[in-house]
């Protein structure tokens, strides 16, 4: 037999060993009856990295409620109008949501709102159609039902400059209400086919003449916009600089919002049930109750992070100011989009995105030959853009159209950012802000524990959080 044959095993003409005969030693199956197996703790696939919970600064709220005091805001932010759609041509504006328009914010006459909503008409727009041109008089106001529209102007050297993207729920032209002879400041072009709800200016003027409450509200809005304010729309404080001699220096004060928002701690709860027989007899080598509790808390923490992103009262996707939301310029999240999102606030601490959105962003970087950097966070190398780490968060939803959002945050009370809220020192506390309370044993010998986590989130100033919306995450053909 050659060396190669001995290394490879028996030659082809030699019979293979067989195990059909009687065993001459103890089998492994029998030996396991006397051996103790090495066990793992119960594993759970749904555990994620939960970077958002780790990176948020948490503020101890002893009173159970956190109030965010701000300067008086004179410029009202815009929200998004909602629609009821029962078919391709049966689209109606939901009247109550018209108060999301800055000029109608706080208006309470529901009958007038219903009449305004009923005067909107549906108009279909084809891709490439120019809706309005800069410098032309404003004759209509538009609400975008769906579609993608680009605002653009002519640059200093004759080139086209894109100044914004308008998508579903946004408004075009409503800012001209209350202004004499308003003109379009930018042109608007449809990048995709879309549907608009259109309201002629003549209807606005007619309703203003017939509804004294509407005329009074619009007049008060126009007067408020004439008050001195800073670039963020806050009530201005008169200051003087560069003067010489002995001029009279004006004075004033910083006015506060008289109706600040308050955040009450929310909660996630469940009742853990363990049979007394299990708790008494099957605790070696692992405590069954402890393992049940460990996995239950993991599930609660997962839901806690989901709530911080998606809760309609305080979640990031719903609490972010609409002035801090932008759409991607071309569909997929590009370096240009990330730069735009980054430029909207100071001291951005982190990006949060669905892993598939991060992958889509990396594909755009690859196409341009760019290599995103990394940031060291607690010993982990995290991908980063412009030095700001991009953390994965699978709680950010993906829409039916395969789009998602990328969230940028400035964090901390000192930087007027986003903060997490919880309360420590609660009765029977098991972890900070989480307690486990014994609920007794029922007639079926079931031990019950109430497991509760208390938490919330606050955005101290609007520009603390920004969102890149409508980011396409699907792979496109090269």
Image (cartoon, rainbow, N blue to C red):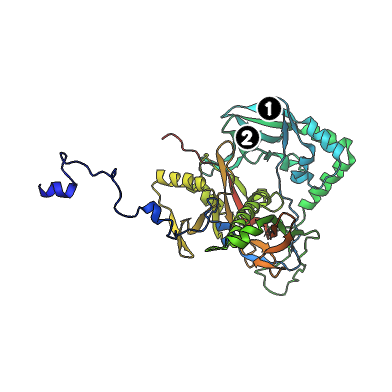
Helix, strand or loop under label 2: loop
Relative vertical location of residue 292 with respect to residue 130 in this rendering, above or below:
below
Q: CA distance from mark 1 to mark 2?
A: 18 Å
Mark seen at residue 123: 1
- From the viewer's perspective, is residue 383 above or below residue 148? below
Q: Is residue 167 left or right of residue 258?
A: left
Q: Is residue 196 visible in the rendered structure shown here?
A: yes
Of the residues under marks 1 and 2, which one precedes in the sequence?
1
| Residue at x 76% of width, y 71% of height | 248
Q: Position of residue 361 (x, y in %)?
A: 48, 46
Dot 2, crowdedness within 10 Å: few (<14), some or many (≥20)?
some
Closest to the observer, 55 or 157: 55
The one nearer the camera, 28 or 84, is 28
Q: Can you tell which mark lies on residue 301?
A: none
Disc 1: CA contacts within 10 A as few (<14), some (14-19) or many (>=20): some
Q: Quadrant of residue 441?
A: bottom right
Picture coordinates of residue 259 (x, y %)?
Answer: 80, 58
What is the x, y in percent for residue 280? 62, 62
Q: Could you tell me which secondary element the residue under label 1 belongs to?
A: strand
Q: Quadrant of the C terminus?
A: top left
Residue 410 visible here: no
Tell me: 239 left or right of 363: right
Direction left: furthest residue: 2
CB under 8 Å between discs 1 and 2:
no
- The disc placed on residue 133 is 2
Q: Residue furthest bottom?
A: 246
């Amino acid at each position: 037999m050659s060396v190669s044959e001995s290394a490879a095993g028996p030659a082809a003409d030699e019979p293979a060993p067989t195990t059909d005969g009687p065993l001459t030693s103890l089998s492994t199956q029998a030996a396991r009856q006397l051996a103790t197996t090495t066990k793992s703790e119960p594993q759970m696939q749904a555990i994620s990295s939960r970077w958002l919970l780790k990176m948020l600064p948490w503020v101890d709220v002893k009173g159970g409620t956190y109030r965010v005091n701000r300067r008086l805001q004179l410029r009202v932010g815009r929200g998004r109008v909602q629609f009821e759609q029962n078919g391709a041509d049966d689209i109606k504006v939901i009247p109550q949501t018209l108060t999301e328009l800055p000029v109608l914010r706080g208006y309470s006459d529901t009958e007038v709102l219903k009449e305004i909503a009923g005067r909107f008409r549906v108009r279909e727009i084809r891709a490439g159609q120019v809706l309005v041109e800069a410098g032309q008089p404003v004759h209509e106001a538009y609400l975008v039902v769906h579609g993608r529209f680009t605002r653009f102007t002519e640059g200093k050297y004759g080139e086209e400059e894109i100044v914004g993207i308008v998508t579903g729920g946004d408004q075009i032209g409503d800012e001209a209400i209350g202004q004499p002879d308003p003109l379009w400041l930018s042109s608007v072009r449809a990048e995709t086919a879309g549907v608009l709800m259109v309201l002629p200016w003549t209807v606005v003027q007619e309703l203003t003449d017939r509804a004294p409450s509407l005329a009074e509200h619009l007049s008060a809005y126009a007067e408020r916009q004439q008050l001195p304010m800073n670039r963020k729309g806050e009530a201005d404080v008169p200051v003087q600089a560069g003067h010489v001699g002995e001029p009279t220096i004006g004075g004033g004060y910083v006015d506060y919002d008289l109706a600040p928002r308050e955040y009450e701690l929310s909660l996630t709860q469940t009742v853990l049930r363990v049979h007394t027989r299990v708790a008494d007899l099957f605790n070696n080598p692992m405590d069954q109750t402890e393992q049940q509790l460990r996995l239950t808390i993991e599930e609660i923490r997962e839901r806690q992070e989901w709530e911080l992103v998606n809760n309609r009262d305080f979640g990031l996707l719903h609490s972010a100011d609409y002035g801090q939301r932008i759409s991607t310029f071309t569909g997929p999240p590009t370096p240009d989009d990330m730069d735009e999102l980054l430029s909207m606030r100071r001291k951005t601490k982190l990006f949060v995105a669905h892993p598939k959105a991060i992958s889509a962003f990396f594909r755009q970087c690859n196409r341009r030959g760019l290599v995103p950097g990394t940031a060291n966070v607690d010993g982990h190398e995290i991908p980063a853009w412009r030095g700001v780490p991009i953390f994965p968060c699978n709680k950010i939803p993906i829409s039916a159209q395969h789009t998602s959002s990328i969230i940028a945050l400035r964090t901390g009370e000192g930087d007027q950012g986003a903060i997490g809220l919880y309360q420590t020192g609660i009765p029977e506390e098991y972890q900070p802000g989480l307690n486990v309370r014994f609920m007794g044993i029922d007639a079926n010998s079931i031990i019950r524990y109430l497991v509760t986590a208390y938490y919330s989130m606050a955005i101290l100033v609007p520009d603390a959080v920004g969102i890149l919306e409508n980011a396409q995450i699907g792979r496109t053909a090269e």
